[in-house]
Structure formats: structure tokens, C-alpha cells
Amino acid sequence: MRYSSYLKAGLLGAVLTTASVVGVQAQTSLKLGYSLAPTSHYGVGATAMAEELERLSDGAFTIEQFPANALGGEREMVEGAQIGTVDLVITSTGPVGNFVPDTLITDIPFLFRDYEHAHAVLDGPIGQNLLAQFPDHGLVALAWGENGFRNLTNSVRPIHNAEDTRGLKVRTMENQVHMQAFEGIGVLPTPMAFPELFTALQQGTVDGQENPIGVILSANFSQVQDHLSLTQHVYSPALILMSPMVWGGLSEEQQGWFEEAAAAGAQAMRAKVREDAENGVATLREEGMQVVEDVDRASFEEALQPVFERFAERFGQERIDEIRNYGN
Ligand code: EAX
């Protein structure tokens, strides 16, 4: 009896000691990089993810944010995740097709009708199968986030239809699908990393660029671009990526926390993208931009027909239609 209670007390002591030691050792801070300001949709998503992770892990994991390209452009951050110098990245799919080629299908213009359609595809089997491919390319994809529908801005003239874009020099992301599409409608595509873009617009190295309203706001492009056209020519997904170096060292339970926290981050990101898309145009007008709301989007789709044929050869018409018609 005596011996057993002694044993119990001893065991309890041991358990408590172990618990407190583990608690101290497991307090890990992870570096998360993204290209926009903390107030942007990426910042809102990062904060929601960090809060949920801290809650789920009882403070064992914290996230330190590196906004505004502090860890480099998106391509560099993804490379950093591969080699383990960056733990977590929120990135557009811009450069991701250079790492996981199958994701390029999601960058096809006029593929997604609206936000609901995009969410259904990405959260459903098609999107989840794409996320499952990342480990084969030295990356872990925790969730699809969101950047939003992209709109064209420029400093030369108001754009009402595809014809108006002819001969403009437009910065594109470092993305083969986007470059081919712009070339197809007679634009001179100039691929460039996002951190160089503001200066390139300011100095006139390029005439224009295209991005979701939230990015145009966050990056202060109204200071260097006079015209905005609500072309909504392509949906721009984002991804929450993790370094396999960190992922591989986690228990299954811990990995689950990261997935759950990333899902919460993605939801918050989507909500902020929507808010900016709805309210941001008025702000950009106040900041002096001339806005063309009534864009002839059909003219862009028509001009893109030859490019769509090339995409069909590359990705398979069936796979493209599967996304296009999803949920119909
Ligand atoms: O991810 O490079 C781009 O235009 C992206 O849309 C931007 O960095 C936000």
C-alpha cells in the first residue's frame, strides 16, 4: 500500500516533469513569408493561421510573419521552403507552376466563373489532388488560399476591350500560362518578380500590370497607374506552403494542427479578398484611378481562342472542361 502510493506519487512527478520539459522544448517559432503588407489578404490570412495554430498547439507553435517580400520574391520564398531556409510561405500560383507543373492548369484565363466556382474546384477532389502532388516536388501544400480575380491597370489609355490592349507592355507573373495568354491577345508580356514591379511601373519600364483589387490597393499601384479596367480575366489562386524539412519533423497530430490552422487562414484570406473586391474599387477611384467597369470581357475570351487550343493540347481538353463545368 505504502509502496504503491509512493510509486504513484513518483510516477506523477515524472509525468509532470516530462510535461514541463516537453512544453519548453516544443516552443517552436516558424518563419512565414509573403509578398504583401500585413494589412493585405495575405496578412489577414497569416494572422488567422497563426492564432489558430497557437490555440490548437496550446502555444507550442508560434508564427513570425515576414511581410512585403522581406524573405524575397515569391519564387525565392518557394525555393527557400524547398531547402528549409523558409518554414512557411503564402504565395500566388504565379511562380508555382515552375515547381509543380500540373498547377498551371489553374492559371488558365476565364477558367473559373466566380469565387464560388473556384472554391468548389480547389476544395474538391481536383484541387486536393493537386495539393497532394507537392511532396513529389520537395514541397508541402497545406491549403489553397486566395489572391483573387485579376484586373488590368496601365498608364497609357483606358482599356474597354481586347483590341485596346494591343502593343501595351504589361508585366506578367513568371508564369508560362499567363505569358502565353497575354502574347496571344497582342500584348508584350514582360515577366518580372513582384518586388521589382512598383519601380518598373514608376520608371515606365512597363506600361501596365494586372492583379486583384486587394493587391493593387496594398501595393499602392494607384500612385503609378492611371487606368484600371475590371477585366477579371483570370482567377489567381494562392497557396499556403510549408517546408518539408519542418513538416517531416512533426508528429501526425502536429501536422493536423498545421492543416487545420492553414484552413482557417485560407478562409480569412478569402473573406478579405472578397471585401477588397467589393469595396476597394471606390478607394482606388478616390486615389485618382480612372476605372472602366463595363469591360467587354467576351472580346478577351474571343481573342484568346487560339491560345485556348494550345492549352487544350498541353493540359487535355477533358481536364480543362472538368474544371470549367465543375458543379454545373
Ligand atoms: O501574390 O506577383 C503577383 O502579381 C502576385 O499576384 C502578387 O505578388 C501577390
Image (cartoon, rainbow, N blue to C red):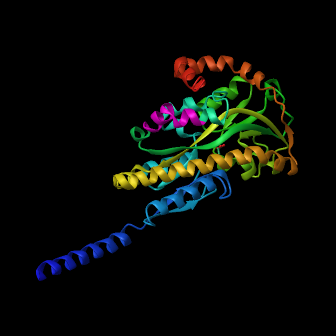
- Direction from residue 75 to residue 290 in the image, left or right: right
Relative to 25, say whether 152 is above or below: above
Q: Position of residue 251 (x, y in %)?
A: 34, 55
Q: Position of residue 11 (x, y in %)?
A: 21, 75
Write down the region rendered in magenta.
119-133
Considering depth in this image, is 274 or 311 the residue closer to the camera?
274
Residue 207 can be seen, yes or no: no
Q: Hey, which quadrant is residue 75 in on the image? A: top right
Residue at image x 56%, y 22%?
320
Q: Hey, which quadrant is residue 250 in on the image? A: bottom left
Residue at image x 83%, y 35%?
293
Q: Hey, which quadrant is residue 192 in on the image? A: top right
Relative to 143, say whether 295 is above or below: above
- Direction from residue 263 to residue 26 in the image, left or right: left
Relative to 112, say whether 312 is above or below: above
Quarter of the rendering occupied by the C terminus:
top right
